[in-house]
Amino acid sequence: SQQGEEDPQALSIQEGENATMNCSYKTSINNLQWYRQNSGRGLVHLILIRSNEREKHSGRLRVTLDTSKKSSSLLITASRAADTASYFCATDAGSGGGADGLTFGKGTHLIIQP
Amino acid sequence: DAGVIQSPRHEVTEMGQEVTLRCKPISGHNSLFWYRQTMMRGLELLIYFNNNVPIDDSGMPEDRFSAKMPNASFSTLKIQPSEPRDSAVYFCASNHRRTSTDTQYFGPGTRLTVL
């Protein structure tokens, strides 16, 4: 079963607006990552937040993590048409060191209207 | 850096045929992962290797699926015999255990259609 569940499943906003996606998970984690997938392409890593962190920024991305609620959010500010893609959260609950497989949610499909 | 390379990019085959998917990880990476993506089940981890050794194959759906990593620069995922329900996009990913920030680097995927 999927560890992460993204919400919403689909999101359509106007260019320039902010987009927020949420992810919930079920078990304890070492870290949580967000990936982007453009149509017909592979996944690209966006940002990673460790279990002892609460917030992290990278350019127009802001990720929060609430381990007590087993949830995370991804905020994309000042959205652009090129941000149109599917976004997945992924959890790593293994022994650490990056060598364990990730468990992915089913993703949020984000559409940025020009 | 060429990134993770997968071949073929597209494969169409008939039920019962053997299918072999190939992956070349990023040079220097010592962990390799195979995932499958379908509309119904999303992205699922099938198997992963550390230093060419299979660590966890609990995600492999059936005995029809097998994976090998004969050396650090090559892995195969084989389905024999293939069935229509195996139709999916298969991704290979790699990272380096000791120095990575846990990021996995994905290949472009192989889109498999079993008729």
Image (cartoon, coloured by chain):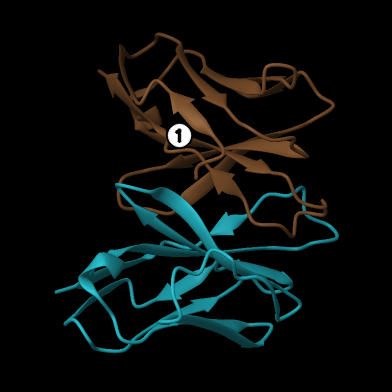
Residue A61 visible to an observer of this rendering: no
Q: Quadrant of the N terminus of chain B?
A: bottom right
The residue positioned 39% from the left and 20% from the top of the image is A8
Estimate the x, y position of residue A66 in percent, counting from the top left: 71, 17
Estimate the x, y position of residue A59 in percent, counting from the top left: 62, 24
The residue positioned 67% from the left and 35% from the top of the image is A32
Q: Is residue A23 left or right of residue A39?
A: right
The residue where tag 1 is placed is A87
The residue positioned 79% from the left and 30% from the top of the image is A51
Chain A, hue in figure: brown
Q: Quadrant of the C terminus of chain B?
A: bottom left
Q: Say which of A26 and A32 sits in front.
A: A26
Q: Amino acid at mark 1?
A: Tyr
Q: Is residue A25 left or right of residue B88?
A: right
Quarter of image, res A100: bottom right
Examine the rendered structure and indicate whether residue A80 appears above or below residue B1: above
Q: Chain of mark 1?
A: A
Examine the rendered structure and indicate whether residue B80 appears above or below residue A28: below
Estimate the x, y position of residue B30 in percent, counting from the top left: 74, 72
- Describe the element under mark 1 as helix, strand or loop: strand
Estimate the x, y position of residue A114 in percent, counting from the top left: 25, 18
Chain coloured cyan in the rendered structure: B
Residue A19 visible to an observer of this rendering: yes
Quarter of image, res A81: top left
